[in-house]
Amino acid sequence: MPYSAEISRRQPSCFLFLIDQSGSMAEAFSNENVGKETSKGVNESINRTSEPIQKSQAVADAVNRLLDSLGQRCVKGNEIYDYFDVGVIGYNSEVTSALNGIAGDKLIAPIGKIYENPTELEKRAQKLPDGMGGVVEVYNDFPIWFKPISIGGTAMCSAFALARIVLENWIEKHPNSYPPTIINITDGESTDGDPTDEVNNLKKLSTSDGSVLLYNIHISSEFMQPVSFPNTTEVLSDPFACSMFDLSSSLPYSAQKAAEKEGYKISPDSKAFMFNADPVKLIQFLDIGTRTENLR
């Protein structure tokens, strides 16, 4: 059965995040539930405010939060087990590592090296129940690996091309590992061409456990109905969203079950795609895309 390989220090998996940092990412989210509390507290890393939040800020918060979460999953006693290699590529008119040199001259690094080396810690307020019907504001350290950027174009083709080169090298060293997972977060159409060929070449890469997985999340400034893990383009009114749907991988079984636990309606043909997500759903999407149950 594909996507069932054991993940261990000898046989790690890989997560590669592609982050749109173009000028349009300075725009605000459109969804009305931005900043609202959730029963599971998944938006704990997002500033609680009635003011609109920029897409670039929400994405940076979500990915920084996830890097912290990935590191915590790998802590065993006083040791960090390097179950994952991780990279973050930012793209606007140029394509570069967003990890501020943590990976050295490489684009990916073991999770332990990343987890132990945030560039800074920010104090973030979190509102918690006080046990008497009110709330109390608590300040916690929030680790930062990269900050929001929003400038220039959207060199998505170049980002996918670089991802292919990075993962070709990674797979050569880990031919039997759980396949790499790419999570692409964007709010606009590619400005350096049609990414279809680059994506198809990328998705041809595989380990003995299956092909590379591509998750796409298209965030929007428009007031349009959010769509999560669809199985058809008929529910999508945005032409670019339809294109991103077509490029996305089918949702593997473990991710289907993770999504169902979060309350999403999933079918066997669901794609690893989300459209017009608010910051809360963005965090859930990243968590589902990186959920693993076979760590050893």
Image (tube, rainbow, N blue to C red):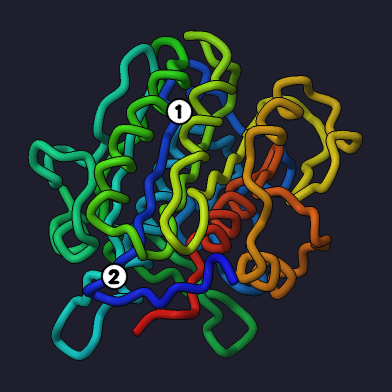
Q: Within 10 Å of the Cα at label 1, are there few (<14), some (14-19), or many (20+) other Cα atoms?
A: many
Callout 2 amino acid:
Gln
Whole-percent x, y for residue 168 in the image: 32, 40
Which dot marks residue 20? 1
| First in residue order: circle 2 vs circle 1 | 2
Q: Is residue 230 left or right of residue 37?
A: right
Which dot marks residue 160? none
Q: Residue furthest left?
A: 104
Q: Within 10 Å of the Cα at label 2, are there few (<14), some (14-19), or many (20+) other Cα atoms?
A: some
In which quarter of the view is residue 285 placed?
A: bottom right
In which quarter of the view is residue 146 placed?
A: top left
Q: Residue furthest front?
A: 208
CA distance for labels 2 and 1: 30 Å
Whole-percent x, y for residue 249 in the image: 63, 46
Where does the C terminus fall, quadrant-wise? Answer: bottom left
Q: Secondary structure at mark 1?
A: strand
Callout 1 amino acid:
Asp
Residue mark closest to the camera, 2 vs 1: 2
Q: Nearer the viewer, residue 271 or 72?
A: 271
Where does the N terminus fall, quadrant-wise? Answer: bottom right
Residue drawn at 59 percent across, 59 percent down: 284
Whole-percent x, y for residue 173 in the image: 23, 54
Q: Is residue 224 left or right of residue 276?
A: right
Q: Secondary structure at mark 2?
A: loop
Residue drawn at 43 percent across, 16 percent down: 155
Which dot marks residue 11? 2
Residue drawn at 26 percent across, 26 percent down: 96
Examine the rendering and report whether any part of residue 62 can be seen.
no
Examine the rendering and report whether any part of residue 26 can be seen.
yes
